[in-house]
Image: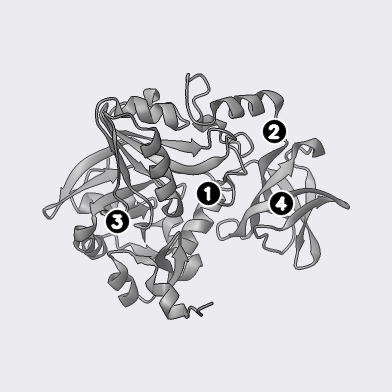
Amino acid sequence: MTEVTPDAAATRLRRSPLHERHTAAGAKFAPFGGWEMPLEYTGGGVLKEHTAVRAGVGVFDVSHLGKARVTGAGAVDFVDACLSNDLGRIGAGRAQYTLCCDDATGGVVDDLIAYRYADDHVFLIPNAANTTEVVRRLRAAAPPSVTVTDEHEGYAVLAVQGPRSADLLAALGLPTEHGYMSFSPATLDGVELTVCRTGYTGELGYELVVPAAQAVPVWDALFAAEPAPRACGLAARDTLRTEMGYPLHGQDLSLEITPVQARAGWAVGWDKPAFWGRDALRAEKASGPGRTLRGLVALERGIPRPGMTVRVGDTVVGTITSGTFSPTRKEGIALALIDTAAALADGDQVEVDIRNRATPMRLTRPPFVTPSVR
């Protein structure tokens, strides 16, 4: 077997069109879904970056996220018959959180955002690692009238998040008044882009979808404007989304964790005549899942991490799927799959094995902080 050096491995990772800007800002990089992306920045770090988003405005490069386009006669109807949520609930110019499920098991192939441009045009943003598989499944099912295009590297995505995000975009003449989960075309210094009222932090925020070739001038414009934003890495994005109880695919959702188990049934159009996984999910919903995703708050010092065991006394009742130190609450928080047979209620106490110590935690229902997305 040929040894692979770290440098050689790194060259296989895709890079954002903003990579040089991140390097100049002192970013610490890490692999995310096949991409080399900023984890945090020198002079910032997770706590400062997290706080900037909760109190001011931060900018994340999330260009590793996938991009796919579904076009042609009947595109909306086709996507609606594949993905879980009901695209009929929204009109043109609106976005929707939805799930790509396995048809046989109901497990989650990916969670993604669908942007409805028109009846014949849907733009999808899946997770980086799952884009190829989502596109493959859609292409395999598409009728001749519908084309599915993988545009993963064609666009950059910049997430402008925080209570002052609208002020920052307004200073650049970009639209900010459109409603939550909607989007609007715009132009910034000659660059055509899309301003989406979406995000993954629980704060007022926007995501800018920009042609990759024009990502650098848009990034520079954001950091030349007032109020001055802080560059934020994906480590802070993870603490922010965990405080909101937002699931991360591969941890809180997966081919082994269904929407019913993850309490994501709100993203399923249960009355639709067809979507991938419909029969399996309706059967699981009717019978009741064997486990459900619950929130946990540490009652003593200790940071829960994915894979840790949850117990009541000597009985194992679940497993941590996401866990972190909450910079806002100043305590450990987690999401965990808990056996429904344990009959535990919010407020009940469990123990989590943290560093070989039984750390008490209290069951609760996320989010762990008050959302401010609107």
- Image disc number at residue 196: none
Q: Which residue is at 51% across, 19% downward?
A: 271
> Tag 3: residue type?
Glu
Viewer-nearest of discs 3 and 2: 3
Q: Which residue is at 43% across, 37% downward?
A: 97
Residue 83 visible from this viewpoint: yes
- Corner quadrant of residue 185: top left
Q: Farthest residue in the front direction?
A: 1
Q: What's the distance in space between the residues labelled 4 and 1, CA to CA? A: 16 Å
- Circle 4 is placed at which residue position? 319
Q: What's the distance in space between the residues labelled 3 and 1, CA to CA? A: 21 Å
In the image, residue 238 lies at what x, y percent? 51, 57
- Circle 3 is placed at which residue position? 153
In the image, residue 196 lies at what x, y percent? 31, 43
Q: Is residue 20 left or right of residue 186?
A: right
Which residue is more in the foreground, 234 or 143? 143
In the image, residue 322 lies at what x, y percent? 61, 54
Q: What's the distance in space between the residues labelled 4 and 3, CA to CA? A: 36 Å
Q: Is residue 280 left or right of residue 205?
A: right
- Circle 2 is placed at which residue position? 289
> Tag 1: residue type?
His
> Tag 2: residue type?
Pro
Q: What's the distance in space between the residues labelled 2 and 4, CA to CA? A: 15 Å
Secondary structure, mark 4, is strand
Residue 48 position (above or below residue 146)? below
- Circle 1 is placed at which residue position? 249
Residue 371 visible from this viewpoint: no
Q: Earlier in the sequence, mark 2 or mark 4?
A: 2
Which class describes the residues within 10 Å of circle 2: few (<14), some (14-19), or many (20+)?
some
Q: Earlier in the sequence, mark 2 or mark 1?
A: 1
Residue 265 position (above or below residue 67)? above
